[in-house]
Amino acid sequence: MAQAEKRQGKVKHWQNVVVRQAASGLSVAEFCRREDIAAWKFHYWKKQLSEEHDTAEVPKFQEVRMADVIDEPAELLFPNGLVLRIPTGFDEGRLRRLIDAIGVAPC
């Protein structure tokens, strides 16, 4: 496996871990303890992902307006392959925090 492919695999793995932690509602310490992950490694990768996002090309956003009540679940697709499934009656503030935690703009 080429070095770049190996790194990309690690990046995708840690993006997923960061998203799961944010969605869990647990502190980083508690999440890492439950997932048997070294907290220092979690923080290292979260910082790496944040720095990579900061140096990446600024994504173009398209405004999407949703009704106050969503009648069915929705999905956000991210360029890195992550899919964020949003249940009916989601909390908009929590959704914003999750997207911020991911550190990558949806497609």
Image (cartoon, rainbow, N blue to C red):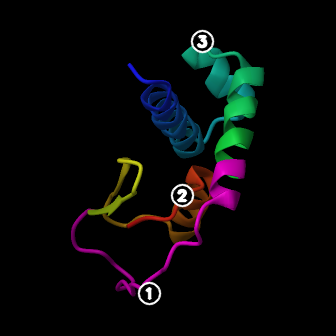
Report if residue 93 lies within the magenta region: no
Residue type at numbered disc 2:
Val
Q: Distance between the residues labelled 3 and 2?
A: 25 Å
Image spot of residue 86 (x, y percent): 35, 59
Magenta segment main secondary structure: loop
In the displayed image of the protein, which residue is found farthest to the front?
Answer: 2
Q: Nearer the viewer, mark 1 or mark 3?
A: 1
Image spot of residue 103 (x, y percent): 60, 55
Vertical order, 38 against 101 (above or below): above
* Image: magenta residue range: 51-73
Q: Mark 3 points at which residue?
A: 36
Q: Which residue is drawn at 78% across and 22% down?
A: 40
Q: Residue at x 52, y 40 (%)?
A: 15
- Mark 3, other Cα within 10 Å: few <14 / some 14–19 / many ≥20: few
Whether the residues at callouts 2 and 1 have beta carbons within 8 Å, the answer is no
Q: Name the residue under label 2.
A: 104
In the rendering, which numbered label is found on residue 89?
A: none
Q: Name the residue under label 1.
A: 63
Dot 1 lies on which element?
A: loop
Give the quarter of the image for residue 93: bottom right
For this view, does 8 lie left or right of residue 27?
A: left
